[in-house]
């Protein structure tokens, strides 16, 4: 009887050897990526890393932390903008619904309260998002030198309004859930409905520093919610419209190299997928034009369809739009031409 060459003992030994090889490879890459720029021989091995190992290895790159801070700032900005839009939608909905005076009568009390709760929620979310954006921006700018950052920031924002927004967030989170009241103005066709803070109640119930209190006292008896956040939003838009491109222009070499490594890994992964996918498409004679709407926006589709059908020019444009990682080399391009039956 022939001895089984795949005995449990041998299987365990092989498994142990493979695990050790994987561990050695990981340690080799971790050590290698700590040199910036990452040497090409390290990068050539790095692009074949997969699964959870990617994060563990790349977290040792010197550009990892700052890259994450920049991405965090961009996410915070998108979140802030979404919160602002949601508040605007809630205020618009209340203004539209309140055109029917029965909203303020007893049978519709629950509906009116829903508008109040929704508005209160959006004020809470937006004030938190605004304060978070400020804090995260400093986490980035403390590590990148942005010329005249403080000067442009001071010129762009009303310091007292800025202080009020930040303290509003602190009050809502830690002190008291400050109340906004609704008000109807200009009865008739010119009627408008508003949510407002009453200055006296803010000063009595809230905890504000001197700048924030100065802002409240200078607004008169009430602070209109829409006007407050719209004017502040305009400052946010202008300032971050300037800051985000500046950050990208001033990127330290370590962040540029980190992004290069990530992009090379993504490109290699895409190449592997396309090498598997396109031979099957060609073999089956799949009509790729019928699937373009899944990958291109309507505007991009119009742009592509305006070019000569099945021409290299048209397919090159499709590749440029879809290939976000720069994965398409000459070999893949020829496969794509064949899959689209280029004339």
Image: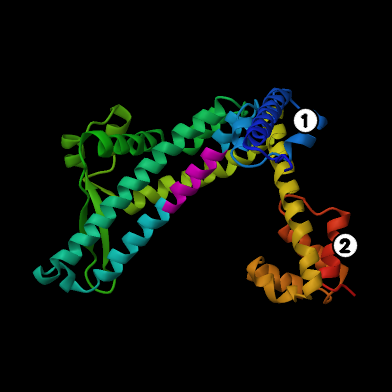
Q: Is 81 within the magenta?
A: yes
Q: Residue at label 1?
A: 42
Taking the spot 45% from the left edge, 35% from the top edge, the residue there is 134
Q: SS of the residue at dot 2?
A: helix
Q: CA distance from mark 2 to mark 1?
A: 29 Å
Which mark is first along the chain, 1 or 2? Answer: 1
- Name the colour scheme: rainbow
Q: Is residue 250 visible?
A: no
Q: Is 53 within the magenta?
A: no
Q: Which residues are magenta?
A: 71-82
Please name whichever residue, 33 or 322, is drawn nearer the observer in this view of the structure: 33
Q: Is residue 197 visible?
A: yes
Overall secondary structure of the magenta section: helix
Horizontally, is 28 left or right of 104 in the view?
right
Horizontally, is 58 left or right of 75 in the view?
right
Local packing at callout 2 (Cα closer than 10 Å; few below 14, some 14-19, many 20+) is few
- Name the disc covering residue 143, or none: none
Q: Residue at label 2?
A: 334
Taking the spot 26% from the left edge, 68% from the top edge, the residue there is 191
Taking the spot 90% from the left edge, 75% from the top edge, the residue there is 343
Q: Position of residue 114 (x, y in %)?
A: 22, 61
Q: Position of residue 127 (x, y in %)?
A: 35, 43
Q: Is residue 103 above or below residue 166?
A: below
Quarter of the figure that contains the N terminus: top right
Please name whichever residue, 219 or 14, is drawn nearer the observer in this view of the structure: 14
Q: Position of residue 45 (x, y in %)?
A: 77, 35
């Amino acid at each position: 009887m022939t001895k089984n060459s795949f005995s449990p003992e041998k299987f365990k030994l092989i498994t142990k050897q493979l695990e050790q090889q994987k561990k050695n490879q990981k340690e080799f890459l971790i050590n290698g990526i700590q040199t910036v720029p990452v040497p090409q021989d390290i990068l050539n091995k790095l692009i074949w890393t997969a699964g959870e190992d990617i994060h563990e290895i790349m977290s040792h790159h010197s550009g990892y932390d700052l890259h994450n801070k920049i991405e965090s700032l961009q996410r915070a900005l998108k979140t802030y903008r979404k919160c602002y839009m949601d508040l605007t939608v809630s205020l618009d909905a209340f203004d539209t619904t309140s055109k029917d005076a029965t909203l303020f009568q007893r049978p519709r009390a629950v509906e009116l309260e829903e508008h109040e709760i929704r508005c209160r929620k959006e004020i809470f979310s937006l004030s938190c998002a605004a304060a978070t954006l400020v804090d995260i921006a400093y986490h980035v700018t403390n590590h990148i030198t942005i010329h005249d950052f403080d000067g442009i920031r001071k010129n762009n924002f009303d310091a007292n309004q800025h202080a009020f927004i930040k303290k509003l967030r602190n009050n809502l989170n830690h002190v008291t859930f400050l109340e906004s009241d609704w008000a109807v103005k200009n009865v008739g066709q010119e009627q408008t409905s508003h949510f407002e803070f009453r200055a006296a109640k803010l000063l009595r119930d809230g905890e504000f520093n001197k700048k924030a209190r100065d802002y409240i006292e200078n607004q008169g008896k009430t602070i209109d919610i829409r006007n407050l956040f719209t004017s502040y939003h305009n400052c946010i838009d202008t300032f971050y419209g300037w800051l985000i491109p500046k950050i990208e222009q001033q990127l330290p070499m370590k962040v540029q190299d980190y992004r290069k490594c990530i992009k090379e890994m993504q490109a290699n992964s895409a190449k592997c997928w396309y090498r598997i996918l396109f031979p099957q498409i060609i073999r089956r004679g799949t009509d790729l034009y019928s699937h373009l709407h899944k990958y291109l926006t309507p505007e991009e589709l119009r742009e592509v369809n305006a070019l000569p059908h099945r021409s290299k020019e048209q397919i090159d444009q499709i590749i440029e739009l879809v290939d976000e990682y720069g994965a398409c080399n000459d070999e893949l391009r020829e496969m794509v031409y064949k899959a689209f039956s280029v004339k």
